[in-house]
Image (cartoon, rainbow, N blue to C red):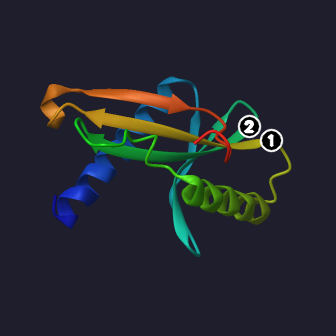
Amino acid sequence: MENKNKKDLGRWGEDLAASIVSRMGYEILMRNVTFRGGELDIVALDGDELVILEVRVRTKGKVQSPTESVGPRKVKRLLRAGSLLVERLEWDGPWRVDVMGITLGGDVAKGYECEYIKDITLGMI
């Protein structure tokens, strides 16, 4: 898959994830927040809890599922970026990092499967 297609697929996945969590009652605050060493895909509120949502999209048949592709190094980066965001926003409430994995059935027209993991930690992934 060439980079442009990968980027478009990622943007599509982030749009889908934002739509899904909005229907779950989350309030989207920010998207594509850039920090040194990375980017936070979606920042939202789930009630009174700040949620940093990492979105991963893969096509069916890949060796790893989208959520399995979030390894310990990425979890550390997400937690570090989350801490920086909380500091930047002067947020004093609870916060967590979630992952949404979207698996496509070959192409977008065939549909998708979605896996959502709340409050990831280094020991979970």
Label 2 SS: strand
The local crowd at label 1, few if under 14, some if 14 to 19, many if 20 or more residues have their Cα within 10 Å, is few
Measuring from the top left, give residue 3's x and y in whole percent.
21, 66
The image position of residue 104, as x and y in percent, is 24, 35
Q: At numbered mark 1, what does the secondary structure look like: helix, strand or loop?
A: loop
Side of 84 where 16 appears, left or right: left
> What residue is pinned by disc 2?
49
Sequence-earlier tag: 1 or 2 = 2
Pointer 2 local density, CA inside 10 Å: few below 14, some 14–19, many at least 20: some
Query: Where's residue 124, x and y in %?
Result: 63, 39
Residue 16: image location, x then y, percent: 36, 37
Q: Is 108 in front, or is 65?
A: 65
Q: Quadrant of residue 121?
A: top right
The amino acid pointed to by label 2 is Glu
Q: Which mark is residue 59?
A: none
Q: Residue furthest front?
A: 63
Estimate the spatial distance between the alpha carbons at disc 1 and disc 2, rounded to whole Å: 5 Å
**Quarter of the rendering occupied by the C terminus:** top right
**Which quarter of the figure has residue 53?**
top right
The quadrant the N terminus occupies is bottom left
Callout 1, which amino acid?
Answer: Pro
Numbered circle sitting on residue 94:
1
